[in-house]
Image (cartoon, coloured by chain):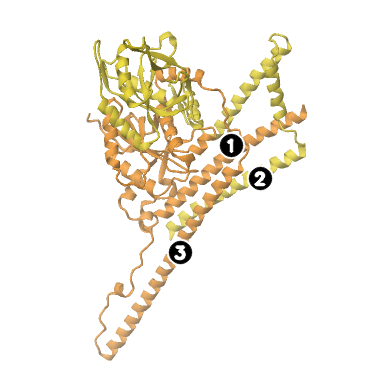
Chain colours: A yellow, B orange
Amino acid sequence: MACNLECRVHPVVLFAIVDSYERRNEDAKRVIGTLLGSYDKNAVEVTNCFAVPHNESEDEVAADLEYARNMFELHKKVNSAEVIVGWYSTGPDVSEHSVLIHEYYSRESKNPVHMTVDTTLRGSKMGIKAYISTSLGVPGKTVGTMFTPVPVEIISYVPEKVGVNMIQLGKFNAKRSVSMVKDLTQVDKACGQLQEKLSMVLEFVEDVLSGRVPADTTIGRFLMDLVSNVPQIEKEEFEAMLNSSMKDLLMVVYLANLTRTQLALNEKLSIMS
Amino acid sequence: MAAKRSTSSLVQSVQIDGLVVLKIVKHCQEEGSGGSDLVQGVLLGLVMDNRLEITNCFPFPKRTEEEDFDEVHYQMEMMRNLRKVNIDHLHVGWYQSTYFGAFINKPLLDSQFNYQNSIEESVVLIYDPLRTTQGFLALKAYRLTKAMMDFYVKMDFSPEAVKSADISFESMFEEIPVTIKNSHLVNALCCEIEDHMSKDQTFNYMDLATSSMLEKNLRLLMECVDEISMDANKFLNFQRQFQKQQQSKQQYLQKRQQENAQRQIRGEEPLPEEDINKLFKPLQPPARLDSLLIAGQIDNYCGQIGEFASQSFGKLFMAESLQDSASNS
Protein backbone atom coordinates (compact mmCIF):
# COMPACT_ATOMS: atom_id res chain seq x y z
CA MET A 1 0.00 0.00 0.00
CA ALA A 2 2.30 2.70 -1.25
CA CYS A 3 1.18 5.88 0.39
CA ASN A 4 3.40 8.01 -1.76
CA LEU A 5 1.88 6.73 -4.94
CA GLU A 6 1.58 9.28 -7.66
CA CYS A 7 -0.78 9.13 -10.57
CA ARG A 8 0.45 10.32 -13.96
CA VAL A 9 -2.11 10.75 -16.67
CA HIS A 10 -1.70 11.32 -20.37
CA PRO A 11 -4.02 13.83 -22.03
CA VAL A 12 -5.28 11.09 -24.34
CA VAL A 13 -6.99 9.42 -21.41
CA LEU A 14 -8.74 12.60 -20.30
CA PHE A 15 -9.97 13.32 -23.81
CA ALA A 16 -11.28 9.80 -24.13
CA ILE A 17 -13.08 10.03 -20.79
CA VAL A 18 -14.79 13.25 -21.75
CA ASP A 19 -15.71 11.78 -25.09
CA SER A 20 -17.26 8.70 -23.54
CA TYR A 21 -19.18 10.90 -21.14
CA GLU A 22 -20.60 12.85 -24.05
CA ARG A 23 -21.70 9.65 -25.71
CA ARG A 24 -23.39 8.15 -22.71
CA ASN A 25 -26.86 6.67 -22.81
CA GLU A 26 -29.86 8.88 -22.20
CA ASP A 27 -30.53 7.80 -18.68
CA ALA A 28 -27.00 7.32 -17.41
CA LYS A 29 -25.70 10.02 -15.18
CA ARG A 30 -22.15 8.90 -15.28
CA VAL A 31 -19.89 6.57 -17.19
CA ILE A 32 -17.24 4.22 -15.98
CA GLY A 33 -14.37 2.56 -17.73
CA THR A 34 -11.07 0.82 -17.36
CA LEU A 35 -7.72 2.56 -17.14
CA LEU A 36 -4.72 0.96 -18.80
CA GLY A 37 -1.13 1.79 -18.21
CA SER A 38 1.95 0.69 -16.37
CA TYR A 39 3.39 0.70 -12.89
CA ASP A 40 6.67 2.36 -12.24
CA LYS A 41 8.19 2.44 -8.75
CA ASN A 42 6.13 4.99 -6.91
CA ALA A 43 4.00 6.05 -9.76
CA VAL A 44 1.25 4.79 -11.95
CA GLU A 45 1.31 5.97 -15.52
CA VAL A 46 -2.08 5.89 -17.20
CA THR A 47 -1.73 5.81 -20.95
CA ASN A 48 -4.98 4.45 -22.30
CA CYS A 49 -8.57 3.78 -21.37
CA PHE A 50 -11.86 2.44 -22.68
CA ALA A 51 -15.45 2.82 -21.54
CA VAL A 52 -17.41 -0.05 -20.06
CA PRO A 53 -21.19 -0.14 -20.32
CA HIS A 54 -22.89 -0.15 -16.97
CA ASN A 55 -26.25 0.45 -15.33
CA GLU A 56 -26.67 2.26 -12.13
CA SER A 57 -29.69 2.91 -10.01
CA GLU A 58 -30.38 3.83 -6.43
CA ASP A 59 -29.72 0.44 -4.94
CA GLU A 60 -27.68 -1.50 -7.37
CA VAL A 61 -25.03 -1.25 -9.95
CA ALA A 62 -24.21 -3.62 -12.77
CA ALA A 63 -21.28 -3.41 -15.11
CA ASP A 64 -20.59 -5.51 -18.15
CA LEU A 65 -17.46 -7.24 -16.96
CA GLU A 66 -17.37 -9.64 -19.86
CA TYR A 67 -17.06 -6.63 -22.14
CA ALA A 68 -14.29 -5.21 -20.01
CA ARG A 69 -12.32 -8.41 -20.23
CA ASN A 70 -12.89 -8.65 -23.97
CA MET A 71 -11.75 -5.13 -24.64
CA PHE A 72 -8.70 -5.59 -22.49
CA GLU A 73 -7.73 -8.64 -24.53
CA LEU A 74 -8.10 -6.68 -27.76
CA HIS A 75 -6.06 -3.81 -26.45
CA LYS A 76 -3.42 -6.17 -25.22
CA LYS A 77 -2.93 -7.39 -28.78
CA VAL A 78 -1.88 -3.94 -29.84
CA ASN A 79 0.25 -3.01 -26.88
CA SER A 80 1.17 -5.88 -24.64
CA ALA A 81 2.90 -3.65 -22.14
CA GLU A 82 -0.32 -2.06 -20.96
CA VAL A 83 -2.04 -3.58 -17.97
CA ILE A 84 -5.16 -2.66 -16.07
CA VAL A 85 -4.15 -0.07 -13.52
CA GLY A 86 -7.54 1.05 -12.34
CA TRP A 87 -10.81 2.53 -13.44
CA TYR A 88 -12.41 5.90 -13.94
CA SER A 89 -15.79 7.43 -13.47
CA THR A 90 -17.19 10.80 -14.39
CA GLY A 91 -19.06 12.81 -11.85
CA PRO A 92 -17.95 14.85 -8.90
CA ASP A 93 -17.96 12.36 -6.10
CA VAL A 94 -17.12 8.88 -5.11
CA SER A 95 -20.36 7.04 -4.42
CA GLU A 96 -21.11 3.87 -2.51
CA HIS A 97 -21.40 1.89 -5.69
CA SER A 98 -17.84 2.83 -6.46
CA VAL A 99 -16.69 0.52 -3.68
CA LEU A 100 -18.21 -2.47 -5.41
CA ILE A 101 -16.68 -1.59 -8.72
CA HIS A 102 -13.38 -0.94 -7.03
CA GLU A 103 -13.47 -4.40 -5.51
CA TYR A 104 -13.82 -5.94 -8.96
CA TYR A 105 -10.88 -4.01 -10.21
CA SER A 106 -8.83 -5.02 -7.20
CA ARG A 107 -9.12 -8.53 -8.51
CA GLU A 108 -7.75 -7.52 -11.88
CA SER A 109 -4.85 -5.39 -10.72
CA LYS A 110 -2.91 -5.28 -7.52
CA ASN A 111 -3.58 -1.72 -6.45
CA PRO A 112 -6.14 -0.15 -8.66
CA VAL A 113 -6.40 3.58 -8.94
CA HIS A 114 -9.80 5.16 -9.08
CA MET A 115 -9.91 8.36 -11.07
CA THR A 116 -12.80 10.80 -11.18
CA VAL A 117 -13.24 13.49 -13.74
CA ASP A 118 -15.77 16.08 -12.74
CA THR A 119 -17.71 16.62 -15.92
CA THR A 120 -20.44 18.54 -14.15
CA LEU A 121 -17.90 21.33 -13.85
CA ARG A 122 -18.63 21.98 -10.22
CA GLY A 123 -16.89 25.08 -9.05
CA SER A 124 -16.21 25.90 -12.69
CA LYS A 125 -13.33 23.49 -12.71
CA MET A 126 -13.11 20.07 -14.24
CA GLY A 127 -11.55 18.41 -11.27
CA ILE A 128 -9.36 15.44 -12.05
CA LYS A 129 -8.76 13.42 -8.91
CA ALA A 130 -7.39 9.99 -8.21
CA TYR A 131 -7.83 7.70 -5.23
CA ILE A 132 -6.59 4.41 -4.01
CA SER A 133 -8.37 2.34 -1.47
CA THR A 134 -6.95 1.93 1.96
CA SER A 135 -8.43 -0.30 4.56
CA LEU A 136 -9.36 1.29 7.80
CA GLY A 137 -10.86 0.12 10.97
CA VAL A 138 -9.84 -1.62 14.05
CA PRO A 139 -7.96 -4.83 13.29
CA GLY A 140 -9.98 -7.82 14.25
CA LYS A 141 -13.28 -6.08 13.85
CA THR A 142 -15.06 -5.13 10.64
CA VAL A 143 -12.65 -3.63 8.21
CA GLY A 144 -13.81 -0.91 5.89
CA THR A 145 -12.22 0.75 2.98
CA MET A 146 -11.63 4.38 2.35
CA PHE A 147 -10.62 6.17 -0.75
CA THR A 148 -7.49 8.16 -0.12
CA PRO A 149 -6.64 10.86 -2.61
CA VAL A 150 -3.49 10.55 -4.61
CA PRO A 151 -1.72 13.42 -6.38
CA VAL A 152 -2.43 13.61 -10.09
CA GLU A 153 0.01 14.90 -12.63
CA ILE A 154 -0.56 15.29 -16.34
CA ILE A 155 2.41 14.24 -18.43
CA SER A 156 2.83 13.49 -22.06
CA TYR A 157 5.33 12.54 -24.70
CA VAL A 158 6.80 15.37 -26.73
CA PRO A 159 4.68 14.77 -29.83
CA GLU A 160 1.61 14.52 -27.62
CA LYS A 161 2.38 17.96 -26.25
CA VAL A 162 2.58 19.26 -29.78
CA GLY A 163 -0.79 17.70 -30.51
CA VAL A 164 -2.34 19.19 -27.40
CA ASN A 165 -0.97 22.61 -28.22
CA MET A 166 -2.43 22.36 -31.67
CA ILE A 167 -5.81 21.38 -30.27
CA GLN A 168 -5.73 24.17 -27.76
CA LEU A 169 -5.47 26.69 -30.52
CA GLY A 170 -9.09 25.92 -31.30
CA LYS A 171 -10.26 26.88 -27.85
CA PHE A 172 -11.04 30.48 -28.54
CA ASN A 173 -12.17 30.03 -32.07
CA ALA A 174 -15.88 30.59 -32.63
CA LYS A 175 -16.24 27.37 -34.53
CA ARG A 176 -14.03 25.57 -32.03
CA SER A 177 -11.87 24.39 -34.85
CA VAL A 178 -8.32 24.91 -35.97
CA SER A 179 -7.02 24.09 -39.39
CA MET A 180 -3.63 22.86 -40.38
CA VAL A 181 -1.43 25.71 -41.40
CA LYS A 182 1.34 25.92 -43.91
CA ASP A 183 4.79 25.49 -42.53
CA LEU A 184 6.02 29.02 -42.96
CA THR A 185 3.10 30.32 -40.93
CA GLN A 186 4.09 27.91 -38.20
CA VAL A 187 7.53 29.45 -37.98
CA ASP A 188 5.86 32.81 -38.01
CA LYS A 189 3.65 31.78 -35.11
CA ALA A 190 6.59 30.44 -33.16
CA CYS A 191 8.35 33.73 -33.75
CA GLY A 192 5.30 35.56 -32.48
CA GLN A 193 5.28 33.43 -29.32
CA LEU A 194 8.91 34.20 -28.75
CA GLN A 195 8.23 37.89 -29.16
CA GLU A 196 5.45 37.72 -26.59
CA LYS A 197 7.70 36.05 -24.10
CA LEU A 198 10.45 38.59 -24.71
CA SER A 199 8.06 41.49 -24.19
CA MET A 200 6.91 39.95 -20.92
CA VAL A 201 10.47 39.73 -19.78
CA LEU A 202 11.13 43.30 -20.87
CA GLU A 203 8.13 44.50 -18.92
CA PHE A 204 9.41 42.78 -15.85
CA VAL A 205 12.83 44.35 -16.23
CA GLU A 206 11.30 47.79 -16.65
CA ASP A 207 9.23 47.25 -13.54
CA VAL A 208 12.26 46.27 -11.55
CA LEU A 209 14.23 49.24 -12.82
CA SER A 210 11.53 51.69 -11.92
CA GLY A 211 11.22 50.10 -8.53
CA ARG A 212 7.67 48.85 -8.87
CA VAL A 213 8.61 45.25 -8.34
CA PRO A 214 11.39 44.02 -6.07
CA ALA A 215 14.32 42.53 -7.89
CA ASP A 216 14.72 38.80 -7.84
CA THR A 217 18.22 37.39 -8.08
CA THR A 218 17.26 34.08 -9.64
CA ILE A 219 15.41 35.80 -12.44
CA GLY A 220 18.35 38.12 -12.82
CA ARG A 221 20.66 35.16 -13.27
CA PHE A 222 18.33 33.63 -15.86
CA LEU A 223 18.33 36.91 -17.74
CA MET A 224 22.09 36.99 -17.72
CA ASP A 225 22.13 33.47 -19.14
CA LEU A 226 19.66 34.49 -21.77
CA VAL A 227 21.59 37.49 -22.95
CA SER A 228 24.91 35.71 -22.94
CA ASN A 229 23.42 32.82 -24.89
CA VAL A 230 23.43 34.87 -28.06
CA PRO A 231 26.79 33.71 -29.32
CA GLN A 232 29.44 36.33 -29.72
CA ILE A 233 30.69 35.71 -33.18
CA GLU A 234 32.67 38.00 -35.41
CA LYS A 235 30.47 39.72 -37.90
CA GLU A 236 32.35 38.35 -40.91
CA GLU A 237 32.39 34.84 -39.55
CA PHE A 238 28.70 34.94 -38.89
CA GLU A 239 27.98 36.29 -42.34
CA ALA A 240 30.05 33.53 -43.86
CA MET A 241 28.15 30.88 -41.91
CA LEU A 242 24.83 32.40 -42.79
CA ASN A 243 25.68 32.63 -46.45
CA SER A 244 26.90 29.06 -46.66
CA SER A 245 23.74 27.78 -45.00
CA MET A 246 21.61 29.81 -47.35
CA LYS A 247 23.57 28.59 -50.33
CA ASP A 248 23.04 24.99 -49.26
CA LEU A 249 19.35 25.52 -48.97
CA LEU A 250 19.08 27.34 -52.25
CA MET A 251 20.99 24.60 -54.02
CA VAL A 252 18.75 21.93 -52.59
CA VAL A 253 15.63 23.83 -53.54
CA TYR A 254 16.97 24.32 -57.05
CA LEU A 255 17.72 20.62 -57.40
CA ALA A 256 14.31 19.68 -56.10
CA ASN A 257 12.57 21.95 -58.56
CA LEU A 258 14.77 20.63 -61.33
CA THR A 259 13.78 17.08 -60.48
CA ARG A 260 10.15 18.07 -60.55
CA THR A 261 10.45 19.64 -63.99
CA GLN A 262 12.27 16.58 -65.21
CA LEU A 263 9.45 14.40 -63.98
CA ALA A 264 6.84 16.50 -65.71
CA LEU A 265 8.80 16.36 -68.94
CA ASN A 266 9.21 12.64 -68.63
CA GLU A 267 5.48 12.21 -68.27
CA LYS A 268 4.73 14.27 -71.30
CA LEU A 269 7.33 12.46 -73.38
CA SER A 270 6.19 9.00 -72.39
CA ILE A 271 2.64 9.92 -73.24
CA MET A 272 3.69 11.21 -76.59
CA SER A 273 5.67 8.16 -77.60
CA MET B 1 -31.81 6.58 -44.13
CA ALA B 2 -32.17 6.58 -47.87
CA ALA B 3 -30.03 9.64 -48.28
CA LYS B 4 -28.93 10.14 -51.83
CA ARG B 5 -25.28 9.34 -51.91
CA SER B 6 -23.52 11.59 -54.34
CA THR B 7 -20.05 10.99 -55.64
CA SER B 8 -17.05 11.17 -53.41
CA SER B 9 -16.23 14.61 -54.74
CA LEU B 10 -18.72 15.81 -52.20
CA VAL B 11 -16.31 15.37 -49.31
CA GLN B 12 -14.51 18.67 -49.34
CA SER B 13 -12.87 18.66 -45.97
CA VAL B 14 -11.99 16.41 -43.14
CA GLN B 15 -12.80 17.25 -39.56
CA ILE B 16 -10.98 15.42 -36.84
CA ASP B 17 -11.74 15.31 -33.15
CA GLY B 18 -8.91 16.23 -30.83
CA LEU B 19 -9.20 12.78 -29.33
CA VAL B 20 -8.33 11.10 -32.60
CA VAL B 21 -5.25 13.25 -33.06
CA LEU B 22 -3.98 12.37 -29.61
CA LYS B 23 -4.70 8.68 -30.06
CA ILE B 24 -2.79 8.56 -33.32
CA VAL B 25 0.13 10.42 -31.78
CA LYS B 26 0.21 8.09 -28.81
CA HIS B 27 0.01 4.96 -30.92
CA CYS B 28 2.83 6.04 -33.19
CA GLN B 29 4.91 7.08 -30.23
CA GLU B 30 4.54 3.84 -28.38
CA GLU B 31 4.84 1.43 -31.22
CA GLY B 32 6.64 3.30 -33.90
CA SER B 33 10.04 3.13 -32.21
CA GLY B 34 10.81 6.65 -33.24
CA GLY B 35 9.07 6.61 -36.52
CA SER B 36 10.95 4.01 -38.49
CA ASP B 37 8.27 1.35 -38.18
CA LEU B 38 4.99 1.63 -39.94
CA VAL B 39 2.03 2.00 -37.68
CA GLN B 40 -1.54 1.64 -38.89
CA GLY B 41 -5.04 1.94 -37.59
CA VAL B 42 -8.65 2.42 -38.50
CA LEU B 43 -10.65 5.65 -38.48
CA LEU B 44 -14.27 5.76 -37.42
CA GLY B 45 -16.77 8.50 -37.94
CA LEU B 46 -19.50 9.72 -40.22
CA VAL B 47 -20.17 11.96 -43.16
CA MET B 48 -21.99 15.23 -42.53
CA ASP B 49 -22.89 17.58 -45.40
CA ASN B 50 -19.64 17.79 -47.27
CA ARG B 51 -17.38 17.04 -44.34
CA LEU B 52 -15.97 13.80 -43.26
CA GLU B 53 -16.04 13.79 -39.49
CA ILE B 54 -13.65 11.46 -37.79
CA THR B 55 -14.69 10.91 -34.22
CA ASN B 56 -12.66 7.95 -33.06
CA CYS B 57 -10.01 5.52 -34.09
CA PHE B 58 -8.34 2.34 -32.96
CA PRO B 59 -4.93 0.96 -33.73
CA PHE B 60 -4.03 -2.16 -35.64
CA PRO B 61 -1.67 -4.52 -33.95
CA LYS B 62 1.66 -4.87 -35.66
CA ARG B 63 2.01 -7.81 -37.93
CA THR B 64 4.21 -10.14 -35.95
CA GLU B 65 5.60 -13.50 -36.88
CA GLU B 66 2.78 -15.50 -35.33
CA GLU B 67 0.19 -15.73 -38.02
CA ASP B 68 -2.52 -17.00 -35.74
CA PHE B 69 -3.88 -13.52 -35.58
CA ASP B 70 -7.03 -12.80 -37.42
CA GLU B 71 -7.23 -9.19 -38.48
CA VAL B 72 -10.79 -9.25 -39.63
CA HIS B 73 -11.86 -10.83 -36.38
CA TYR B 74 -10.04 -8.16 -34.39
CA GLN B 75 -11.70 -5.42 -36.36
CA MET B 76 -15.16 -6.89 -36.00
CA GLU B 77 -14.73 -7.39 -32.27
CA MET B 78 -13.45 -3.87 -31.77
CA MET B 79 -16.29 -2.31 -33.73
CA ARG B 80 -18.92 -4.38 -31.97
CA ASN B 81 -17.56 -3.37 -28.60
CA LEU B 82 -17.31 0.27 -29.53
CA ARG B 83 -20.88 0.25 -30.66
CA LYS B 84 -21.94 -0.78 -27.17
CA VAL B 85 -20.58 2.43 -25.76
CA ASN B 86 -22.18 4.52 -28.46
CA ILE B 87 -19.01 5.27 -30.33
CA ASP B 88 -19.46 5.66 -34.08
CA HIS B 89 -18.68 2.33 -35.63
CA LEU B 90 -18.67 3.32 -39.26
CA HIS B 91 -15.43 2.78 -41.05
CA VAL B 92 -14.39 5.95 -42.78
CA GLY B 93 -10.77 5.41 -43.50
CA TRP B 94 -7.43 4.48 -42.04
CA TYR B 95 -4.26 6.12 -40.83
CA GLN B 96 -0.62 5.37 -41.24
CA SER B 97 2.60 6.78 -39.97
CA THR B 98 5.31 7.68 -42.39
CA TYR B 99 9.07 8.04 -42.37
CA PHE B 100 10.15 11.26 -44.02
CA GLY B 101 7.19 11.28 -46.32
CA ALA B 102 7.91 7.96 -48.01
CA PHE B 103 4.37 6.73 -48.22
CA ILE B 104 3.48 6.65 -51.89
CA ASN B 105 3.93 3.01 -52.69
CA LYS B 106 1.99 0.00 -53.89
CA PRO B 107 0.70 -1.28 -50.53
CA LEU B 108 -0.78 2.10 -49.74
CA LEU B 109 -2.35 2.30 -53.15
CA ASP B 110 -3.83 -1.17 -52.76
CA SER B 111 -5.25 -0.53 -49.32
CA GLN B 112 -6.68 2.84 -50.20
CA PHE B 113 -8.19 1.45 -53.34
CA ASN B 114 -9.87 -1.34 -51.38
CA TYR B 115 -11.20 1.13 -48.88
CA GLN B 116 -12.48 3.57 -51.44
CA ASN B 117 -14.09 0.81 -53.38
CA SER B 118 -16.25 -0.24 -50.49
CA ILE B 119 -16.64 3.14 -48.83
CA GLU B 120 -16.61 6.02 -51.21
CA GLU B 121 -15.57 8.73 -48.85
CA SER B 122 -12.69 7.04 -47.13
CA VAL B 123 -9.44 8.87 -46.71
CA VAL B 124 -6.02 7.94 -45.50
CA LEU B 125 -4.45 10.10 -42.81
CA ILE B 126 -0.72 10.31 -43.04
CA TYR B 127 0.98 11.26 -39.82
CA ASP B 128 4.65 12.13 -39.67
CA PRO B 129 5.95 11.56 -36.16
CA LEU B 130 9.46 12.91 -36.78
CA ARG B 131 8.28 16.26 -38.05
CA THR B 132 5.79 16.47 -35.23
CA THR B 133 8.58 16.03 -32.73
CA GLN B 134 10.15 19.11 -34.21
CA GLY B 135 7.20 21.14 -33.06
CA PHE B 136 4.38 21.14 -35.56
CA LEU B 137 1.66 18.61 -36.05
CA ALA B 138 2.18 16.94 -39.42
CA LEU B 139 -1.12 15.33 -40.30
CA LYS B 140 -2.47 15.19 -43.84
CA ALA B 141 -5.47 13.54 -45.45
CA TYR B 142 -5.26 11.96 -48.91
CA ARG B 143 -7.66 10.26 -51.23
CA LEU B 144 -7.38 8.67 -54.65
CA THR B 145 -8.84 10.80 -57.41
CA LYS B 146 -11.81 9.51 -59.33
CA ALA B 147 -9.73 9.12 -62.46
CA MET B 148 -7.23 7.03 -60.56
CA MET B 149 -9.95 4.83 -59.14
CA ASP B 150 -11.40 4.08 -62.55
CA PHE B 151 -7.96 3.43 -63.89
CA TYR B 152 -6.99 1.05 -61.12
CA VAL B 153 -10.12 -1.00 -61.46
CA LYS B 154 -9.12 -2.16 -64.88
CA MET B 155 -5.82 -3.52 -63.57
CA ASP B 156 -4.25 -2.69 -66.89
CA PHE B 157 -1.09 -0.68 -66.54
CA SER B 158 0.26 -0.72 -70.05
CA PRO B 159 1.40 2.55 -71.57
CA GLU B 160 -1.61 2.81 -73.85
CA ALA B 161 -3.99 2.49 -70.95
CA VAL B 162 -2.16 5.19 -69.07
CA LYS B 163 -2.31 7.46 -72.07
CA SER B 164 -6.00 6.94 -72.64
CA ALA B 165 -6.82 7.46 -68.98
CA ASP B 166 -4.66 10.57 -68.95
CA ILE B 167 -3.16 9.80 -65.59
CA SER B 168 -0.09 11.68 -64.51
CA PHE B 169 1.71 11.39 -61.21
CA GLU B 170 0.04 14.56 -60.06
CA SER B 171 -3.47 13.31 -60.54
CA MET B 172 -3.11 10.17 -58.47
CA PHE B 173 -3.76 11.46 -54.99
CA GLU B 174 -5.55 14.54 -53.89
CA GLU B 175 -5.03 16.20 -50.57
CA ILE B 176 -8.01 17.21 -48.52
CA PRO B 177 -7.86 20.06 -45.98
CA VAL B 178 -7.97 18.99 -42.38
CA THR B 179 -9.44 20.81 -39.41
CA ILE B 180 -9.46 19.84 -35.78
CA LYS B 181 -12.63 20.41 -33.88
CA ASN B 182 -13.53 19.97 -30.25
CA SER B 183 -16.74 19.96 -28.29
CA HIS B 184 -17.38 22.50 -25.56
CA LEU B 185 -16.69 20.06 -22.77
CA VAL B 186 -13.40 19.15 -24.31
CA ASN B 187 -12.55 22.83 -24.51
CA ALA B 188 -13.16 23.07 -20.79
CA LEU B 189 -10.83 20.14 -20.38
CA CYS B 190 -8.24 21.92 -22.48
CA CYS B 191 -8.35 24.93 -20.20
CA GLU B 192 -7.94 22.64 -17.24
CA ILE B 193 -5.02 20.80 -18.78
CA GLU B 194 -3.28 23.98 -19.70
CA ASP B 195 -2.98 24.86 -16.05
CA HIS B 196 -1.62 21.49 -15.14
CA MET B 197 0.73 20.71 -17.91
CA SER B 198 4.35 21.56 -17.40
CA LYS B 199 5.38 24.64 -19.19
CA ASP B 200 8.72 23.44 -20.38
CA GLN B 201 8.18 23.80 -24.07
CA THR B 202 11.52 22.66 -25.24
CA PHE B 203 10.57 22.37 -28.84
CA ASN B 204 13.28 22.65 -31.34
CA TYR B 205 11.20 24.21 -34.01
CA MET B 206 13.57 27.10 -33.76
CA ASP B 207 16.42 24.76 -34.42
CA LEU B 208 18.84 26.08 -37.00
CA ALA B 209 20.45 22.71 -37.67
CA THR B 210 19.11 21.84 -41.07
CA SER B 211 21.66 19.44 -42.38
CA SER B 212 20.43 16.14 -40.95
CA MET B 213 16.89 16.59 -42.23
CA LEU B 214 18.11 17.71 -45.62
CA GLU B 215 20.60 14.91 -45.87
CA LYS B 216 18.03 12.24 -45.15
CA ASN B 217 15.53 13.75 -47.51
CA LEU B 218 18.08 14.01 -50.26
CA ARG B 219 19.25 10.46 -49.75
CA LEU B 220 15.71 9.15 -50.09
CA LEU B 221 15.23 11.37 -53.11
CA MET B 222 18.37 9.95 -54.72
CA GLU B 223 17.18 6.42 -54.19
CA CYS B 224 13.90 7.25 -55.84
CA VAL B 225 15.59 8.92 -58.74
CA ASP B 226 17.74 5.82 -59.22
CA GLU B 227 14.65 3.67 -59.28
CA ILE B 228 12.90 5.85 -61.76
CA SER B 229 15.92 5.94 -64.04
CA MET B 230 16.03 2.15 -63.97
CA ASP B 231 12.39 2.06 -64.83
CA ALA B 232 12.89 4.57 -67.63
CA ASN B 233 15.72 2.43 -68.97
CA LYS B 234 13.50 -0.60 -68.99
CA PHE B 235 10.89 1.29 -70.88
CA LEU B 236 13.41 2.54 -73.40
CA ASN B 237 14.73 -0.97 -73.92
CA PHE B 238 11.25 -2.19 -74.49
CA GLN B 239 10.63 0.52 -77.04
CA ARG B 240 13.84 -0.26 -78.85
CA GLN B 241 13.07 -3.93 -78.99
CA PHE B 242 9.59 -3.18 -80.16
CA GLN B 243 10.94 -1.08 -82.97
CA LYS B 244 13.36 -3.75 -84.00
CA GLN B 245 10.63 -6.30 -83.95
CA GLN B 246 8.45 -4.10 -86.11
CA GLN B 247 11.28 -3.72 -88.56
CA SER B 248 11.96 -7.40 -88.81
CA LYS B 249 8.27 -8.01 -89.25
CA GLN B 250 8.20 -5.62 -92.15
CA GLN B 251 11.21 -7.24 -93.69
CA TYR B 252 9.69 -10.64 -93.38
CA LEU B 253 6.46 -9.50 -94.98
CA GLN B 254 8.33 -7.91 -97.80
CA LYS B 255 10.35 -11.00 -98.43
CA ARG B 256 7.22 -13.04 -98.40
CA GLN B 257 5.61 -10.81 -100.98
CA GLN B 258 8.65 -10.89 -103.19
CA GLU B 259 8.80 -14.63 -103.03
CA ASN B 260 5.13 -14.92 -103.75
CA ALA B 261 5.50 -12.63 -106.74
CA GLN B 262 8.38 -14.68 -108.03
CA ARG B 263 6.51 -17.88 -107.56
CA GLN B 264 3.56 -16.52 -109.41
CA ILE B 265 5.83 -15.65 -112.26
CA ARG B 266 7.17 -19.14 -112.26
CA GLY B 267 3.67 -20.50 -112.04
CA GLU B 268 3.97 -22.18 -108.66
CA GLU B 269 1.63 -21.84 -105.79
CA PRO B 270 2.24 -19.03 -103.34
CA LEU B 271 3.57 -19.99 -99.95
CA PRO B 272 0.97 -20.23 -97.25
CA GLU B 273 0.54 -17.24 -95.06
CA GLU B 274 2.04 -18.06 -91.76
CA ASP B 275 0.79 -16.60 -88.63
CA ILE B 276 3.10 -13.71 -88.14
CA ASN B 277 2.57 -13.60 -84.45
CA LYS B 278 3.95 -17.07 -84.01
CA LEU B 279 7.19 -16.05 -85.61
CA PHE B 280 7.58 -12.82 -83.76
CA LYS B 281 6.33 -13.19 -80.28
CA PRO B 282 4.65 -9.95 -79.22
CA LEU B 283 6.55 -8.15 -76.51
CA GLN B 284 4.89 -7.37 -73.24
CA PRO B 285 4.82 -3.64 -72.59
CA PRO B 286 6.04 -2.95 -69.05
CA ALA B 287 3.60 -1.82 -66.44
CA ARG B 288 3.69 1.89 -65.90
CA LEU B 289 2.20 1.83 -62.45
CA ASP B 290 5.51 1.67 -60.63
CA SER B 291 6.90 4.62 -62.49
CA LEU B 292 3.80 6.62 -61.65
CA LEU B 293 4.16 5.78 -58.00
CA ILE B 294 7.83 6.61 -57.90
CA ALA B 295 7.21 9.87 -59.71
CA GLY B 296 4.56 10.75 -57.18
CA GLN B 297 6.95 9.92 -54.37
CA ILE B 298 9.68 12.11 -55.84
CA ASP B 299 7.19 14.90 -56.18
CA ASN B 300 6.33 14.53 -52.54
CA TYR B 301 9.95 14.61 -51.45
CA CYS B 302 10.58 17.73 -53.52
CA GLY B 303 7.58 19.41 -51.96
CA GLN B 304 8.81 18.52 -48.50
CA ILE B 305 12.26 19.84 -49.22
CA GLY B 306 10.75 23.08 -50.46
CA GLU B 307 8.68 23.50 -47.32
CA PHE B 308 11.57 22.68 -45.06
CA ALA B 309 13.82 25.07 -46.94
CA SER B 310 11.34 27.92 -46.60
CA GLN B 311 11.14 27.32 -42.86
CA SER B 312 14.92 27.25 -42.57
CA PHE B 313 15.20 30.49 -44.49
CA GLY B 314 12.84 32.13 -42.06
CA LYS B 315 14.85 30.87 -39.12
CA LEU B 316 18.13 31.97 -40.69
CA PHE B 317 16.86 35.48 -41.29
CA MET B 318 15.68 35.68 -37.71
CA ALA B 319 19.07 34.57 -36.47
CA GLU B 320 20.66 37.20 -38.66
CA SER B 321 18.55 39.97 -37.23
CA LEU B 322 19.27 38.75 -33.71
CA GLN B 323 22.97 38.79 -34.44
CA ASP B 324 22.77 42.25 -35.94
CA SER B 325 21.05 43.66 -32.92
CA ALA B 326 23.48 41.89 -30.61
CA SER B 327 26.49 43.25 -32.44
CA ASN B 328 24.98 46.70 -32.60
CA SER B 329 24.15 46.96 -28.91
Give the percent coordinates (x, y) of residue A100.
Answer: 29, 17
Nearest the viewer among B301 and B58 is B58
Neighbor class of circle 3 (other Cα within 10 Å; few <14, some 14-19, many 20+) is few
Residue drawn at 69 percent across, 40 percent down: A242
Residue drawn at 45 percent across, 52 percent down: B294
- Going by the numbered disc 1, the residue's amino acid type is Gln
Q: Secondary structure at mark 2?
A: helix
Q: Which residue position holds label 1?
A: B311
Residue drawn at 42 percent across, 52 percent down: B292
Structural distance between the alpha carbons of marks 1 and 2: 15 Å
Task: Name the chain letter of the residue that bears numbered label 2.
Answer: A
A11 above or below B299? above
Residue B113's image quarter? top left
- Labels 1 and 2 touching (C-beta < 8 A): no
Residue drawn at 73 percent across, 38 percent down: A238
Q: Which residue position holds label 3?
A: B236
A48 above or below A247? above
Residue B291's image quarter? bottom left
Q: Which residue position holds label 2?
A: A247
Give the percent coordinates (x, y) of residue B155.
Answer: 32, 53
Q: Secondary structure at mark 3?
A: helix
Q: Is residue A205 left or right of residue A43?
A: right
Nearest the viewer among B160 and A193 is A193
Asked if residue B89 shows in the view, the reply is: no
For residue B156, the mark is: none
Neighbor class of circle 2 (other Cα within 10 Å; few <14, some 14-19, many 20+) is few
Q: Secondary structure at mark 1?
A: helix
Neighbor class of circle 1 (other Cα within 10 Å; few <14, some 14-19, many 20+) is many
Q: Is residue A123 left or right of residue A95?
A: right
Q: Earlier in the sequence, mark 3 or mark 1?
A: 3
Give the farthest residue toward the front: A140
